[in-house]
């Protein structure tokens, strides 16, 4: 599912005739085969009743219209069926997790039994580390990136404390080189090799949340395995953004949330991948009854018999009302095709960067890598003039109907997502951003 170098070049085919005129954006939208999917979303509107320019899918995706229908259906069946809905609802609640399997396979590149929708991201991260972070002797180090998402770092520190380990001695972080914003893959590999037999776990993002940098997860996995370590990934900013091949890459586990590029709503059910090679080794786990084999789950026997595959790591029954939107979103993504989404994303993000560079010039610093293979659809920007001016520019964008977000101390993040964003949206962003840069000193 990964786009080849040739595919990446082809993805930029609209740009040789690039123009900063609105007509160019309109022509790009007219040629966009994914354009009809925009109508399948409820996009936030401003005080004038018109849709806002929503470029914040890296934080929370907008609502698919079908998601509203699915939630309404579940509410109606709860009202009509009560407890019987576990067996007789249109989508029986006991087997609800099965509704996500094909869609999660599509966006993760996993086998059917390697994925499961359950819990939330950080809970799943704790569950995975409970199984796969097993410090023994000197092999107790966890490697993460400096500036990792706070919740991931909190979870890692929690695990180290649980094992009564000194975080200063066991948590290792890789930082960008002096004067650089992003990490070099060779520096990650060098640190993995340096830690050697002391390394227990590499926990890495598919896409770094602040910079938008995408990583070669296959290469990181190979480096970790060469030292006898586990390779786990937080795919929160990668799933639904980039084509993934978790099975082929050989990742040991991965976790994600579903409310960003999977558009499943605030606090939506998360998910987990466990490679099939771990199914027969029966690693220790924090178990619960929904991870018990389905055929004997309700016999209420004292012994735990794990369900086959990743489902054996489930703990509780899925929250139906917050899980239903994910069905709608995954159906839409499968219909559009993750590879087709990626192809548009490459074009749209490249257009965004080039337009902003030509229109705004030295007023912006781009933090996100320029090469398509090193990023998804997110672009992280730093406004010239310092954090105070940057915040004022960001606030001006918000005042003019541009929805993006601010990350302390000085980063504006935007994400033109391929299913609902248009080239015209990006043109409007450039108009408002350049105006703000001129007006705010």
Image (tube, rainbow, N blue to C red):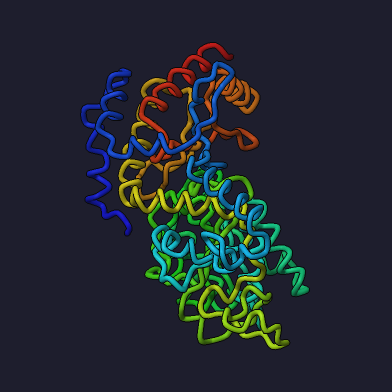
State the quadrant of the C terminus.
top right
Taking the image as shown, residue 24 lies to the left or right of residue 243, namely left
Q: Position of residue 369 (x, y in %)?
A: 42, 43
Q: Position of residue 190 (x, y in %)?
A: 48, 65
The residue lying toward the viewer, choosing from 395 and 98, is 98
Q: Position of residue 219 (x, y in %)?
A: 40, 65
**Residue 276 visible in the displayed image:** yes
At a point 50% along the width and 34% down the height, the residue shown is 42
State the quadrant of the N terminus.
bottom left
Q: How many marks?
A: 0
The residue lying toward the viewer, choosing from 108 and 155, is 108
Q: Position of residue 270 (x, y in %)?
A: 58, 58
At a point 76% along the width and 71% down the height, the residue shown is 162
Q: Is residue 276 above or below residue 4?
A: below
The residue lying toward the viewer, choosing from 131 and 318, is 318
At a point 27% along the width and 23% down the height, the residue shown is 24
Residue at the front extreme? 80
Q: Is residue 11 above or below residue 437?
A: below
Q: Is residue 351 above or below residue 217?
A: above
Taking the image as shown, residue 246 lies to the left or right of residue 178, namely left
At a point 58% along the width and 55% down the height, the residue shown is 323
**Residue 255 visible in the displayed image:** no
């Amino acid at each position: 599912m990964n786009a080849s170098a040739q595919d990446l070049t082809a993805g930029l085919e609209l740009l040789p005739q690039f123009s900063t005129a609105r007509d160019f954006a309109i022509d790009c939208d007219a040629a966009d085969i994914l354009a009809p999917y925009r109508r399948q979303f409820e996009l936030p509107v401003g005080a004038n009743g018109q849709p806002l320019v929503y470029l914040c899918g890296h934080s929370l995706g907008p609502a698919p219209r079908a998601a509203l229908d699915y939630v309404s259906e579940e509410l109606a069946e709860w009202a009509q069926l009560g407890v019987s809905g576990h067996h007789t609802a249109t989508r029986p609640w006991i087997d609800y997790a099965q509704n996500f399997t094909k869609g999660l396979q599509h966006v993760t590149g996993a086998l059917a039994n390697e994925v499961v929708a359950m819990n939330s991201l950080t809970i799943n991260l704790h569950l995975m580390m409970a199984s796969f972070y097993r410090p023994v002797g000197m092999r107790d180090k966890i490697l993460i990136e400096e500036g990792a998402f706070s919740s991931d770092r909190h979870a890692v520190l929690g695990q180290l404390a649980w094992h009564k380990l000194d975080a200063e001695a066991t948590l290792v972080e890789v930082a960008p080189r002096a004067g650089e914003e992003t990490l070099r893959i060779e520096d990650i590999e060098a640190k993995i090799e340096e830690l050697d037999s002391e390394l227990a776990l590499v926990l890495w993002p598919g896409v770094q949340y602040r910079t938008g940098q995408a990583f070669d997860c296959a290469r990181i996995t190979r480096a970790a395995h060469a030292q006898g370590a586990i390779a786990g990934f937080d795919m929160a900013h990668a799933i639904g953004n980039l084509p993934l091949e978790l099975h082929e890459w050989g990742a040991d586990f991965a976790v994600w949330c579903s409310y960003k590029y999977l558009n499943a709503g605030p606090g939506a059910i998360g998910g987990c991948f466990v490679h099939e090679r771990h199914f027969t080794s029966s690693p220790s786990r924090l178990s619960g009854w929904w991870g018990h084999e389905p055929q004997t789950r309700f016999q209420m026997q004292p012994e735990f018999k794990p369900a086959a595959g990743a489902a054996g790591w489930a703990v509780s029954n899925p929250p139906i009302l917050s899980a239903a939107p994910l069905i709608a979103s995954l159906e839409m993504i499968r219909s559009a095709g993750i590879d087709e989404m990626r192809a548009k994303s490459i074009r749209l993000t490249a257009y965004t960067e080039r337009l902003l560079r030509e229109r705004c010039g030295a007023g912006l610093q781009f933090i996100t890598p320029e090469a398509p293979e090193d990023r998804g659809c997110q672009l992280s920007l730093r406004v010239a003039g310092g954090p105070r001016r940057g915040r004022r520019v960001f606030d001006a964008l918000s005042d003019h109907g541009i929805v993006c977000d601010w990350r302390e101390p000085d980063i504006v993040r935007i994400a033109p997502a391929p299913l609902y964003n248009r080239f015209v949206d990006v043109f409007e962003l450039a108009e408002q951003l350049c105006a703000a840069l001129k007006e705010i000193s």
